[in-house]
Amino acid sequence: MKIFGISKNVFFLGLVSLLNDASSEMIYPLVPLFLTQVLGASLATVGIIEGIAESTAAILKTFSGWLSDKIGRRKGLTVVGYSLSAVSKPILSVATSPLHVLLVRFSDRVGKGIRTAPRDALVSFSSSSKELGKSFGFHRALDNLGATIGPLLAFGLLFLLNNNFRLIFLLSFVASALAIAVLIIFVKEVELKKEKAKAPKISWQLFPARFYIFLVAIAIFSLGNSSDAFLILRARDLGMALFLIPVVYAFFNLVYSIFSTPFGVLSDKIGRRKTLGFGLLIFSLVYLGFGAANKAILIWPLFALYGVYAAATEGVLRAFTADLVGEKIRGTAYGLLNGTIGTALLPASAVAGFLWDRVNPSAPFYYGAALALAALLVLLFLPSQPTRKVASP
């Protein structure tokens, strides 16, 4: 059964992501401002908090993907992950020190770590192999439509509540609760045939060489892709008004949402590597722009291009992973992909905070642009055809 040409499961998983991201993005653009302006944290502290939170999630993403393959079920882990993130968000409303924010971000990212790989596997199993790019693109489109709605809600609430960050954090729980209800009621488990559901034995021979080259490219890129908190702080550093910060972040997510499905369909037609390579090139240009920018007005086109980069990479990465590995080890593969990205975020964000404080606010962006180009070079060496068959676990 399909809804708007998309499988029912993928549609409702997209709706879950829309609601959850509306909740998350109500507060995410405000967290770095809350840390620096209300709690008095340094830029280095912001980088460390974001890095620790994301890296912790990375470890769990790797484990949860393997666990979902082992037990042959994904929905339960997805529900647990979304639920943990939902209950942690309102606690941010009573935070009085950067340590409290770290604990909340840690809990939220643990939830993300538990749900991400099983959810991506569920999307892939709910799609035909010829429409993987389309399905992941659609999922990312709804995800980022929610990420557009969230900052706009934050913008309106900042005005109505006189910049009361804490009350906005508390109200963010509503959309998360709705997301969990949709997930439980409408999303169905997809069970593989018994011979495809055996638990994989972890070893280097489990995946083809192409997958490891792919992971190396993503690792290099991720080491320069620091938290989006630095983009928000850069906008503020260039003089953008506080109330416009959620709006420009919503603008980024709107562009991301609009182009996600077209780029997914494009990757189905011309190939994942070309589409992903284009996205990495755009990222490098955007980061160079953030580094060289000297006026707040430049933030708007830069965030728009950043949305194009995200649309050309986020869903395509997931579809590319499904192309490279077999079904019975796909959850494990998504765990490794997300684990690689998340593990790199701690050093990436810590280095960005250090470069901002010790060199200048432009330095983190030049560093990120250089690593994106290095990752693109590695991606060019990825063989067009598999070097060998995927090993059976």
Image (tube, grey):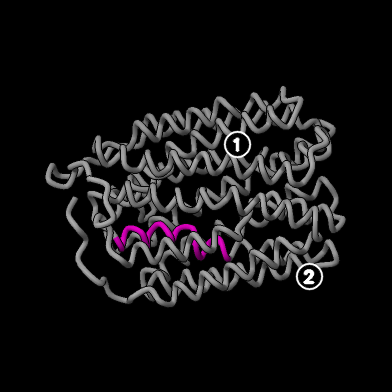
Name the one closer to the observer, 194 or 144: 194
Residue drawn at x 49%, y 38% is 112
Residue 8, can we see it? no
Q: How far across and down, in percent of the image, does residue 270 sit?
A: 39, 76
Q: Which amino acid does label 2 sit on?
A: Ala
Residue designated by label 1? 23
In whole angstroms, how far apart are the C-alphas of marks 2 and 1?
32 Å
Residue drawn at x 51%, y 73% is 376
Q: How far across and down, in percent of the image, does residue 275 sit?
A: 46, 71
Give the residues drawn in magenta, as a range.
309-324
What secondary structure is the stretch in magenta mostly built from? Answer: helix
Q: Quadrant of residue 76?
A: top left
Residue drawn at x 30%, y 62% is 324
Q: How many marks?
A: 2
Q: Which amino acid does label 1 sit on?
A: Ser
Position of 376 relative to 143 (above/below) = below
Residue designated by label 2? 292
Residue drawn at x 77%, y 49% is 245
- Report crowding for label 1: few under 14, some 14 to 19, many 20 or more residues within 10 A (C-alpha): many
Position of 88 relative to 251 (above/below) = above
- As helix, strand or loop, the secondary structure at mark 1 comes to helix
- As helix, strand or loop, the secondary structure at mark 2 comes to helix
Q: How far across and down, in percent of the image, does residue 256 sit?
A: 57, 59
What numbered label is drawn on residue 215? none
Residue 312, can we see it? yes
Q: Is residue 162 magenta?
A: no
